[in-house]
Image (spheres, rainbow, N blue to C red):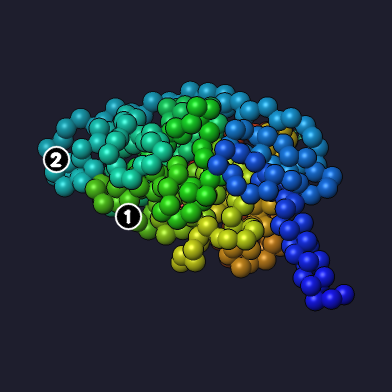
Amino acid sequence: MTSTARLIAFLALVITSAGAVPIWGQCGGIGYAGSTQCDSGLSCVKLNDWYSQCQTAPTAAPPPPPPATTTVVPPPPPATTTGTSTATATDPAASIPAGALTRITNFGTNPTNIGMYVYKPSKVNANPGLLVALHYCGGTAQAYFTGTQFRALADERGYLILYGQAPSSGNCWDVTSTATLTHDAGGDSLGIASAVRYAIANWGVNPEKVFVVGTSSGAMMTNVLAGAYPDVFKGGAIFAGVALGCLSSGPTCTNGHGPYPKLQVWHGTADNVLLYGNFQEQLKQWTNVHGISQTPTATYANTPRQNWTKTVYGTGQVEGYSGQGAGHLLPDTGTEVVAIDFFGL
Ligand SMILES: *[C@@H]1O[C@H](CO)[C@@H](O)[C@H](O)[C@H]1NC(C)=O
């Protein structure tokens, strides 16, 4: 082969391999600029307007249904005034009404105009932790507030919660555009990061105690935030998500920022929206990012409840929770506390 022929053959190989997306990889969605061609034998399946994925079966996945709304016991009324009112005087978050979901605006750069809501329990720790909680496609901040136990746990433990609301028409998060996948470049992720920075600057939030959780589209965004804003988030819990393209292929979304957040990955074997293969794919990705083995260092059957298996990787930088027979609607009510304990909130 002449050197020119070799070069052409090489380029053809590069173009072919760069053009085909492997299983569980992204192959489409609003703002997505990569290849839409899956490896042979795979089909590009649309999960929502913002995300299509290469899968083996060409089953058309329906949009994720909202989780069954769970009635959460309302928090106890704020304690009536006692003689000591020093807490209010020194509370930097005093401007936030306690015990209610309250919309905030003007919290910094918010290029896509995401909605943001804060929940402050009636008793807040000094220098409190902060949880960012992100809804599924079609969801709202209010639905995630009432449908999960993160708020009840905040009432017990004294951390603040920011509930985001996606600005797109289908209420899915943009987890696809170059802007959202790039540190401080724009997109929905920057609006969320801005709200966290605002909370740290104005409400006395401890920057070492900032964590993110999300379901489905919100789980994908949790992956995006953990990848693109490792300087902001110290940990994440991913309930039924997919791996993050920019971590596994080519240009990284992190720009070499410091330590990565610790991650919990939750998935049900009977998830018919984001198929179970996404579970292993995310574990592969996050163990790789942390530079630890994909082989669990510990395995616990029936944890945290029957038919769930917990696996620990490395020294606990990554945890997996596999739910035998569990579907797409995570977290299973009552398991939220496992994520909150993992974070140390
Ligand atoms: C656990 O799985 C078994 C076998 O599939 C099933 O019979 C049982 O109902 C499941 N239990 C729970 C709590 O889901």
Mark number for residue 130? none
Is residue 343 shown left or right of residue 92? right
Q: Nearer the viewer, residue 235 or 128?
A: 235
Residue 102 in the image: x percent, y percent? 31, 31
Q: Nearer the viewer, residue 90 or 23?
A: 23
Mark number for residue 85? 2
Q: Residue at x 26, y 52 (%)?
A: 201
Q: Is residue 20 visible?
A: yes
- Residue type at mark 2 is Ser
Residue 70 in the image: x percent, y percent? 52, 25
Q: Residue at x 39, y 25 (%)?
A: 74
- As helix, strand or loop, the secondary structure at mark 2 comes to loop
Is residue 94 shown left or right of residue 320? left
On the image, which quarter does residue 8 sit in? Answer: bottom right
Q: Is residue 226 visible?
A: no
Residue 280 in the image: x percent, y percent? 70, 51
In the rendered view, would you say 180 is above or below 119? below
Mark number for residue 206? 1
Dot 2 or dot 1, earlier in sequence: 2
Is residue 231 shown left or right of residue 35? left
Ligand 1, by image quadrant, is top right
- As helix, strand or loop, the secondary structure at mark 1 comes to loop
